[in-house]
Image (cartoon, coloured by chain):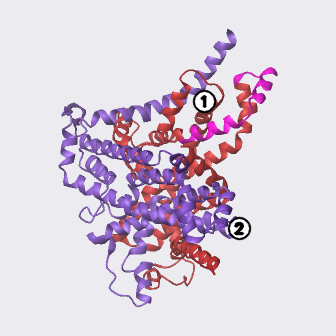
Chain colours: A red, B purple
Amino acid sequence: MKRFLTALGLTLFGLTIVVPLVWVLISSLKSGAEIFSTPWSLPSGFAIQNYENAWKKEGIGPSFLNTLFVTLATMAILIPVGSMAAYIFAKYPFRGSKILFGAFLGGMMFPNFLIVIPLYFLLKSLSLYDTHTGLIIAYVAYSLSFTIFVLTGFFQALPNELAEASELDGCGHFGTFWRVMLPLARPGLIVVGIFNAIGLWNEYPLAKVLLNSSEKRTLPLTIVDMATNQQYSSDWGALFAGLVIVMLPVMIVYWFFRDRIHETMLAGAVKG
Amino acid sequence: MKARRNRTAFILAFLSPAVLLYGLFVVWPLAQAFYLSLFRWRGVSAKKTFIGADNYIALTQDDAFHIALKNNMWLLFVGGSCLLVLGVLLAHGMQSNSRGVRFLRGLYLFPQVISLVVVAIIWQFLLNPSYGLASKGLEKVGIHGYGQPLATSSQALTAVGIAFVWYAVGFYVMLFSAGLKQIPEEIGEAAQLDGSAGWHRFWKVTWPLLWSVKRISTIYIVINVLNIFALVWVMTEGGPNRATETLLTLLYRTAFKESAFGYGTSVAVANFAIAMILAAILMFIYRRSPEERRA
C-alpha cells in the first residue's frame, strides 16, 4: 500500500511535467480555432502549416541557423581553449596555479548579470556589439569556468605514468597532450560539449543585451518576440510550433545522454 | 635547463588563450562593475560623474528596490521551501534503481534543459484565462471564476513562483537522491533494529545525515533565486505594478530601458552582495557535520 502511494505520487508529479510539454506538442498540430475551443483534446488533423508559418513567416528558420552557428562556433573555440587550460591545471602545477584555478572557478559563483552592463560597453567600444562574433566571445569567456572545472577533473584522473611513457618515447609536451591525453579524455570532452551546447542553445539574457538587429537574433529572442506579438497577430499555431522547434532538439540530445549529464551536473554541484 | 624552459613555454602557450579571454571579458568587466556603481552615468562616456556611495544610498530609499528585494526574498523563502520539501520527498520515494525510477529522474529534469524562455511562455499559456489548460481544466471540474493570475497584483508572484519551482525541482531531486545514496546501509539497518521507522526514522536519522546536501542545495537556491531574470521578464516583465519585480528585472529596466547605467550597476552589486551574505550565513549554519558537532 505504501509502495503504491509512493509510486502514485511520483507518477502524478511526473505528469505535471509531461502534460504541459505534450500539450505544447499537440497544440502545435492544431488549427488556431481548435487551440481556443478545445485545448484538452487531440488535434483533428496535422496542421503542418503551423511549422511552415513559424519557420518562414515568423523568422524561426533564420534564428535557428543563427543559434546553430553561434553554438557551434562557441564550442569550436571553447573546447580547445578550455581543455588546454584544464590540462595545465591538472598536469603542470606551477607556483600560483592553484590561485589561478580558483579565479576561474570563481566565475561559476556570481551571476552573469553582475557584469552585463560593463560587458555591453566593452563590446561597444570594440565594435563587437550586435555581432555574432561579440556574442560568441562573451559565451566562450562565460563558459570557461565550468568547462575548465570539469575537464581538469578528467585530466587529473588520467595516470601520470602514461604521460611519462609517452615522453620517453620522444613525444614532446604537445605530442603527449595531443596523441595520448586528449583521446583518453574524450568522454569528458563529449559531456562538457553537450552540457555547454544545451546551455548556449537556450541562452537568453546575454543575447538580449548584446544583440539588436532582428536578422541576427537567436532562437530564444525570436520566440519571445513571437509570444509578445501574438497578442496582436494571433497565429497561435505557429507560436506553439515555434516552441517545439526551440525545445525539441535539446530534449532529444538530453534524453540520449541523460545519465552522463546527471553525473556532470552532480559533480559540478557537489564539488563546485 | 632546456627542458625547464620548454615546460614554461608549453604552460604559457596552453594557458594564455583562456587567461586572456577570461581576463578581458569576465574579470575586467567584473572590476568595472564595482567601479561604475560609484558614478552617475547615462552611457555617454564624457558625462560620467563620480558620486561615491550616492547610488547605494539612493537604493536604500528607492521603493522599486524595496519591492524587488521583498519579491526576491519571498521567492527565496516560499519557493525555496517548496523546492527543499518537494526535492527531499520525491528523492525519498525514488530510492531504487528500477527502470521506472530512472525514467522519472530523467523526466523531472526536462524543464531544466529546455530554455527558461520556453518555460516562461508555456506557463503564460497554461495560465491564460481564455484557452489555457488551467482555466479550462477548472471549468471541467465545475470551478468557475478563474481570473487572470498574471495580470492580478495579488496572484502574479505566486504564479511566477510556481513556474520557478516547476522549472527547478528536478535539480534538487537529483541532489537529494545523491545524498540519500551516500547514507551507509548499516545506518538504516541499525535504525531498523532500534525500532525506528517511518516518519520518526526519517526525521531523526535520515534528515540530519543529509547535512551536506542541505548545505549545497540551500546555497544553490540562493544563487538560483537571485539569478531569476528570463522567467520573470518573459512572463510578466516585472508587472503588474511591479508585483513581480525582482532585482535583476529592476537592473535590466534601470540600465537598458532608462539608461541609468551607474544606478543599474549598483543594483547588480547589491544583488551580488546579498547573495554572498546569504551564502556566508548558510556556510556558517552548516559549518560542521552533525557528528562533529556532537563530538
State the mark number for residue A140: none
Instruction: Give the residue displayed 55% in from the left and 26% down from the top.
Output: A97
Q: Are marks 2 and 1 on the same chain?
A: no
Looking at numbered disc 2 in the image, what kind of residue is underneath it? Ser
Secondary element at tag 1: helix
Q: Position of residue B134 (x, y in %)?
A: 42, 79
> Between tags 2 and 1, which lies in front?
2
- Give the residues drawn in magenta, as a range: A146-173
Q: Is residue A157 magenta?
A: yes
Give how far across and how far down residue A256 sits, in percent. 67, 59
Q: Choose between A170 and B170: the one closer to the eye.
A: B170
Residue at coordinates 70% horizontally, 64% vertically from top-left? B97
Which one is nearer the viewer's eye here, A98 or B283? B283
Q: Which mark is residue B98?
A: 2
- Image coordinates for residue B292, horizontal then vertical, percent: 54, 46
Q: Circle 1 sits on which residue?
A: A89
Q: Taking A235 as reference, is A63 above or below it?
A: above
Give how far across and how far down residue A81 sits, in percent.
58, 33
Vertical relation: B29 (above or below) B118: above
Mark 2 element type: loop
